[in-house]
Amino acid sequence: MTGSLTPRRAFDHLDSTNAEALRMAQMGERGPLWIDADRQSLGRGRAGRHWVSDPGNFMSSFLFTPSAPIAVLHQLSLVAGVAIFEAITQCAEQGRDQLSLKWPNDLMLGGAKAGGVLIESSAFAGETVAVIGIGLNVRTAPMLDGVQTAYLASALGDTINLDQLRDHLATTMDAWLKVWSDGAGFSKIRSAWRSHGPSIDTPLTINVGSETHAGQFAGLDEQGSLRLRTPSGEIQCYTFGDVSLPRNQATC
């Protein structure tokens, strides 16, 4: 498989593929461009969390210049999730039924975290540049306090090849970004994400900083926010937060 024709730049070591992408954007790069690294020393996730980046795992960022309003760029987490899910299932020989997506940006394997997405954007010379950072536990899984983790090869087979995964993901990302169409096609993204996410009425909790709310999953709204049905039956929508699902109900 040759993947898409999108250019790539590969590095043995970076502080962060997202940070490198933003540095390139500041110097005039507008993409589309993939930035890959074998190792990261300062990889990061949402809310400034450190992302452990061990050799043998997948670390890459996609830089491009969307025409979408800034208000819908958060949807790129869901676009990326669908593209990642599809790319991995194309590589895997087994265990595909253990994969699922967790709102807003996690790839799950058997209910444990196997990867994540970090969306960043900035304006340079009047143009909005977006970066989709992706980290996937392919060969090893880090030990994280309070978080169950997993690595893909443990369930999907040792034949997952990083180069092949990069090729598949370049192709699926290109395809799903076209479907998204700068937000105009988000309803199709939402439908695809839902087919890989938790079932309606799955119990969950969402932590939004100083508060934690419990209820049942009630889908996504038209902008991609999480819909939570409270014990009283009220529907509440969340644009951010850390979601926890029962381990035995994390997959559809």
Image: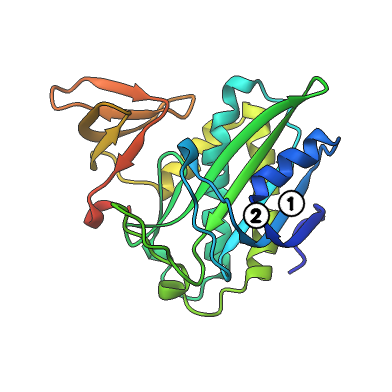
Question: Which residue occupies 56% across, 74% down?
Answer: 160
Q: Which mark is residue 34?
A: 1
| Residue type, label 2 | Ser
Which comes sooner in the sequence, label 2 or label 1? Answer: 1
Q: CA distance from mark 2 to mark 1?
A: 7 Å
Q: Residues within 10 Å of mark 2 (few under 14, many from 20)?
A: many
State the image quarter where residue 96 is shown: bottom left
Image position, residue 111 (x, y; %): 32, 57
Horizontally, is 70 left or right of 236 in the view? right
Q: Return the residue found at the far right.
A: 28
Q: Are marks 2 and 1 in contact (CB under 8 Å)?
A: yes
State the image quarter where residue 132 is shown: top right
Image position, residue 135 (x, y; %): 55, 55
Question: Which residue occupies 22% across, 29% down?
Answer: 213
Closer to the camera in the image, 221 or 226: 226
Closer to the camera in the image, 177 or 40: 40
Q: Which mark is residue 60?
A: 2
| Residue type, label 1 | Trp
What element does badge 1 sit on? strand
